[in-house]
Amino acid sequence: MASPALAEKSVQAGRAKVVTVHANPAHLPAGGGLIRPVSDPQAQSMVNADYIARQTPSATAFDLVAQLPGATVSGSDPFGFSPQTNMTVRGMNGDAIGYVLEGMPLNDIAYYTGYPSQFADSENYETISLQQGAPDLDSPVLNAAGGLMKLRFQTPADKAGGMFDTSYGSYNTNRQFLRLESGEIAHTGLRGFVSYSHGATDNWRGPGRDERQHVDFKLLKTWGQNSHAALLGSWNQAIDSYYPQVTKDAWQADGIHGANNLAAHYNAGNAVGGTDYWRLARQPERTLYMAAPLNLNLTNGLDLRVTPYAQGAYGNAPGGMQLPTTGLFNGTEAVQLDPALANTPGGYMSVRADYTQRSYRSGFTAALDWKRGLNDLIMGYWYDYGDDTEKQTFSTLDASGSGGSIWGGSPLRTSGGQALWGANNHTISQTNALFIGDRLTLLHERLLLSAGFKEVMFSRTGTNAMPGSTYHMGTNTAVPLPRLGARFQITAHHQVFFNATTNFRTPAETALYDVYDPTSGAVEQKGTGNLKNEYSIAEELGYRYADDLVVGGLTLFNYNFTNRQVSTLVMLNGAPVQSTINAGGQTTRGVDVEVGLKPWHHISPYLSGEYLHSTIDNDLSSGTEVLPTRGKRSVRTPTLQAAAGLTYDDGHFFGVMTVKYTGHQYATFMNDERMPSHVTGNLALGYRMKDVSVLHAPQFRMNFINITNQHYLSGVADPTLAAHDTVGQHGGVVSGEAPDYYIGGGFAALFTASTGF
């Protein structure tokens, strides 16, 4: 479909491959790199390296797709350091989206969430694509009703060289990045790159500082006809400061100041015993992702694709809290603290509640792709094994408010020497999936018909070591997932497509286990293995246009859900832990549109928008009551959103301006509280020099984030059933609970100098 004039371009920068933007307008992508022609029978939007290279280097994958239709990004800081971020697509939360790096899944194995600051450095992305409604048949994901984000690294250069950039800006932000390219290694055909980055920034509101170190690497070997093998991965270590989410009342009272921030100093004598001290909520995490994708051309038309992968992660999501010194419980078992602690004045002690997660994951996908005549047949298998351990302990504080190592301090112990637990569970997850599909091209490749089937068998088995709980828990499920699609090329420039897909996912892992209040032994959550899976049927009908000047498309979509799983945050003994709410049935309908123009006098505009109508299909239970939620709007579903981008590039001077409007969205299932709409804008200005000695195209850039310094709520962190007391259908009163919101990042500026060599 793509004409040469619309293809992405890269050049050899000295001895290394560095993405640049040519002065020749014919080589520039449409929409400044925010759109390109596609021909698959499903909605798909994409950003390429031209657009990425003009954004802040610290931008995450979420930030980079925020202008695309259907994507709503809720951030907590302007530069993308904070892990407290979320993305919804067509109103579906980030845990309903699959994240895949060159065939390797990146979703959290317990909660399905994606953590974009862990994925990769922005300088190493070649493309990021967002399939808003239909994941690929062979994608190793099982939660992707909201679509699929596919990440691809830059291809290693043929010749040795590299790239360096350094940044400094608002909130004492500094960042350095270095990528080294090996070029071909000793005539072996092997070539690769490795990069390292370090970045740090002060919290833009309240006390705290974030620091991140990151390594990406890729080694590639190509041979024969369409045969290639690679080894790639990412290592990430970050220590982040916490941005408190706020209720609407708190936002109206204090905005970005006052009680909506943590305390800069430890004060054991204040009303909360110093538990609001910012250092008690520092979040450390360390991750490693590795994959070895292989494509073997076995014979003419027959390819074998195998992608083994392995991952490991450890992190702590702590928070400060007060515990009574007497009357404590380990699960349902009454315990006593050491006598020295039991005599604490006032009868309460301040602690740091450490909620740690250690997970290991490995698996592979294998597929045979057979192209013969008019048919392209694929059949394959995906296996995934996950091992996840989650524990909550409590660390005592010294006079300065320190609770020991932020990776998990020395646990508070009972008089019998046992650790006091808030949670202690271990889960093994296994996925077996078989898939088969066929693509048939007719009418001289103008008509494409596709059909596929995927059978997913998923199991979780776990143990809960909390006294009094059910020790062994488990769940097994097998779900058939059929799909079909069609695409017709009406003329060289006009195309229509249709698809129907099915998806499912199970609730978050925490739904298996009993949770207890250590101050009373009361059950806060009753675990169960009799879980109801979310299941959805989705249809898309679209039109696309592409020529040498304009690229655009329009997609109508419809979803029907049963047992809709809605992500939320719960405070588990002072620590923020993810959970899910079964929201019953849901119907979602809408339209996405986007259009981009090739450069005209070096100017390239881009527009996108979405209209969304999503409703709850049934009344929801709360205890013994039933709330009248049928027909009300779904949470996290803005009716309207729109984005615009304008890019200028004459080969030396360049600039990008983007604006995003996000309409209001409800935060409760009763629709008695909603988040206001907001508009934000970003600006980038830069100059690209000619080569200087060994330096290729040195460039200087200023990025301005939230240029009007809007103070706004960026997203719904934890939706609730109702914000206010509500009379149920049986006459009882269901107590209201205020939802919490993310506060969006304020104005920030960042200067970056970069060069290839």
Image (cartoon, rainbow, N blue to C red):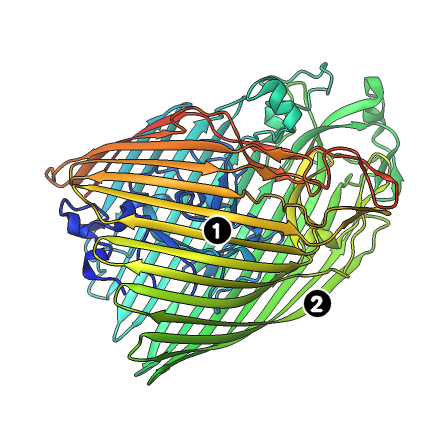
* Mark positioned earlier in the residue sequence (2 or 1): 1
Local crowd size for mark 2, using a 10 Å CA cut-off: few (<14), some (14–19), many (≥20)? some
Q: Does residue 31 lie above or below 518 as drawn?
A: below
Q: Which residue is more in the foreground, 50 or 636?
A: 636
Tell me the residue that label 1 is attached to. 288
Quarter of the image for the N terminus: give it.
bottom left
**Where's residue 711, x and y in %?**
50, 25
**Where's residue 353, x and y in %?**
69, 34
**Where's residue 467, x and y in %?**
84, 48
Q: Which residue appears at 46% of the width and 47% of the height? A: 610
Q: Does residue 595 lie above or below 367 as drawn?
A: above
Do the numbered discs 2 and 1 sit on residues whose CB atoms are within 8 Å?
no
Name the amino acid type tagged 2.
Asn
Label 2 SS: strand
**Mark identifier at residue 15:** none
Quarter of the image for the C terminus: give it.
top left
